[in-house]
Amino acid sequence: MLYLITFSTYGTHLRGDPRGSHDHVRNGNRSFIPPNAALETWHRKNLRHAARVLSSPEERVIVRDVVVKVCAFRRWFLYALHVRREHIHAIADSGDPRRMLNDWKAYATRALRTAGLATQGEPVCTRGGSVHIIKPDQLSGAVRYVLEKQGTPMELYSAQRDVSAADRAKTGMRS
């Protein structure tokens, strides 16, 4: 099966967010929560730590590289990956999507701590994430969405090319 997997960094996409959000807990379904400033403010005030943004290219490269390595080690095929400041999108198959999601977040957190870019006890990623099944005929559109439709490209991986922001700047290449 092909999956579009998305997860955000801690405290950056709260319930009530202006972009909308989803409730993954109640009734085991994925109900949409419309924008709600009061709800978002309540959740923001109740964060136990500061929101976590992958603000430096170094942080995003570390996350990109560790996801690629985990996929290679587990023999999961990674079609596309885009590590942004506040969220990560990936398209992969050959594995349990919840395990992929959890492994990526755990290894990314460990790698950032090992590099001294996150402190012990500081959450890097949110709990949970989003998993959508991609039909084979939707793959090329989903890859385009992940690599090209997220705003200014940041740290990318594609099964066809692995291009970082620094590499694009050196060559003048666009995604």
Image (cartoon, rainbow, N blue to C red):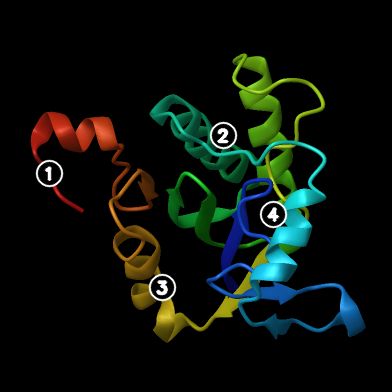
Q: Is residue 149 left or right of residue 169?
A: right
Q: Amino acid at mark 3?
A: Ala
Judging by the rendered image, the residue that carries numbered circle 4 is: 101
Q: Amino acid at mark 1?
A: Met
Quadrant of residue 61 within the rendered picture: top left
Q: Position of residue 9 (x, y in %)?
A: 62, 46
- x 51%, y 84%: residue: 135
- x 59%, y 63%: residue: 5
* Lower sequence index among marks 1 and 4: 4
Q: Are marks 1 and 4 in contact (CB under 8 Å)?
A: no
* Lower sequence index among marks 1 and 2: 2
Judging by the rendered image, the residue that carries numbered circle 2 is: 66
* Lower sequence index among marks 4 and 3: 4
Provide the secondary structure element on which disc 1 rests.
Answer: loop
Q: Is residue 111 above or below residue 142?
A: above
Q: Amino acid at mark 2?
A: Val
Judging by the rendered image, the residue that carries numbered circle 1 is: 173
Q: Residues within 10 Å of mark 2 (few under 14, many from 20)?
A: many
* Lower sequence index among marks 1 and 3: 3
Provide the secondary structure element on which disc 3 rests.
Answer: helix
Q: Are marks 1 and 3 in contact (CB under 8 Å)?
A: no
Q: Position of residue 140 (x, y in %)?
A: 34, 74
Q: Amino acid at mark 4?
A: Leu
Residue 142: which disc?
3
* Lower sequence index among marks 2 and 3: 2
